[in-house]
Image (cartoon, rainbow, N blue to C red):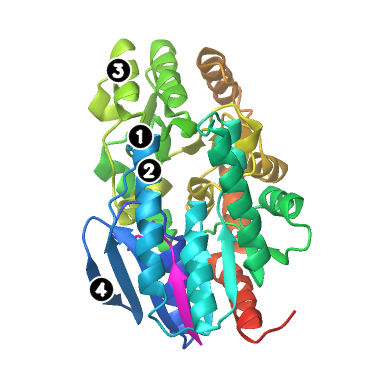
Amino acid sequence: MRIVYIHQHFNFPWEPGWQRPWQFARRLARAGHEVTVICGGPQKQIQELEGVRVHRLAVPYENAMAFGQRVRSFISFMTRACFYASRVKADVVFSSSTPLTTAVPGIVAAKLRRAPFVFEVRDLWPEAPVALGFLKNRTAIRAAQRLEKFAYRSAAHVIALSPGMEEGIKRVWPKARTTVVPNASDVENFAAARQNRDVVRAELGWSEDETVLFYAGSFGVTYDVPWLVRLAGELAARSSTFRVVAYGEGADTENCRRIATEYGLPPLEVLPGKIPRTEIERMLPAADFAVSTLVDNPALEVNSLNKVFDALAAARPVLFNHNGWLPDVLDAHGAGFRLSRDPAEAAVDLIQRLEEGAVDSEGASRAALELARTQFDRDLLFNRFLDVLEAAAAGVK
């Protein structure tokens, strides 16, 4: 099967960022399929790894970009990808959002190559940006809504990253054929660090009596990393046994550094910057808790947060400052805990829970790894993903 895989934000394992496209693409190649990835990057480049041919278009994108800059990047990738995707022979064309505009080159290439189109919804556009106040222009909203509906109508199948996203797709186009394939846990990638947790912890300078809270991900404004920095400050004011580290960059980076300074925290210790995926796999198992943060908006509660699935693979319980389907799942299995949106209240609550032994760290660790293995293992979810592509290519309805 010849597969054209369109995803603007594609990263190799040694690069920071989302790994789902690479992990699925390499598994497709390993299964004997011919995979061509079309993505963006700082410069035009063709690379090949593990049988996956990656065609990077010169379309830069950074999380720190302003909204208008992002939109220009999205449109640039859309137009260029239409041209390149249409030149590649395909039995199925697969596009993954965000942005929603990645649907356009997928639809164009599928029509010209007379191949089925499969669309993956990573975020509900324009529902989420409208709810968050990022998209206010009525003309732009109507255009995005028409494109969203057209994408779902044009797709032989739509993959949603969460049950809530599947519901959102059905609200727009009830006839859509959908399958939920959430983000996944790369259990084996974290195995070595899980087994050598004490050694890695010593290498990092994290003492045995410290409780380490670990965040790795975007510093975009929707992720509310400032809450975590304030939590770090509140914990430091009440105890010397906590260490908070947040790895990443984005639009909120400078704001986070300012907040750290206001609390008397060394900004570069709390906010060391971006790290490659391989370092996350080494460091996360050595922490005591992973942290998932979001601003308080119901539109974000359907998100399939990659950092949570990494935490499960690393056998780390997760502290949440938000609601949603993932906090519900982890809470039900004893692998996650909610904290107050007020950083001071959250600090007091966390300290009290730990002092009173209300948190079963070992039990939560086992529960996290069990969830990773039984519900969210990458190979398990890849098989579901592959079934969708093969059925679409075969014309199965």
Tell me where the magenta segment starts and ends, as one range. Answer: 1-13
Residue tagged 3: 258
Nearest the eye: 11 or 95:
95
For the residue labelled by badge 3, is the local secondary structure a helix, a strand or a loop? helix
Of discs 3 and 1, which sits in the foreground? 1
Contact, CB < 8 Å: mark 4 with mark 2?
Answer: no
Which amino acid, by three-letter code, is at mark 1?
Answer: Ala
Which amino acid, by three-letter code, is at mark 3?
Answer: Arg
Of discs 3 and 4, which sits in the foreground? 4
Vertically, is 93 above or below 102? below
- Tell me the CA gap for discs 3 and 1: 19 Å
Q: Mark 4 vs mark 2: which is more N-terminal? A: 4
For the residue labelled by badge 1, is the local secondary structure a helix, a strand or a loop? loop
Which amino acid, by three-letter code, is at mark 2?
Answer: Arg
Left/right of residue 380 with respect to residue 88 in the rendered view: right
Q: Mark 2 vs mark 3: which is more N-terminal? A: 2
Q: Quadrant of residue 83?
A: bottom left
Q: Residue at x 48, y 46 (%)?
A: 307
Q: Mark 1 vs mark 4: which is more N-terminal? A: 4
Residue tagged 4: 47
Give coordinates of residue 37: x percent, y percent: 39, 71
Contact, CB < 8 Å: mark 2 with mark 1?
Answer: yes
- Tell me the CA gap for discs 2 and 3: 24 Å
For the residue labelled by badge 4, is the local secondary structure a helix, a strand or a loop? strand
Q: Residue at x 62, y 47 (%)?
A: 145
Vertically, is 281 above or below 22? above
- Tell me the CA gap for discs 3 and 4: 39 Å
Residue tagged 1: 66
Which amino acid, by three-letter code, is at mark 4?
Answer: Gln
Classify 10 Å Cα crowding around label 1: few (below 14), some (14-19), many (20 and above): few
Q: Residue at x 30, y 76 (%)?
A: 49
Decide whether residue 4 is among the magenta residues. Answer: yes
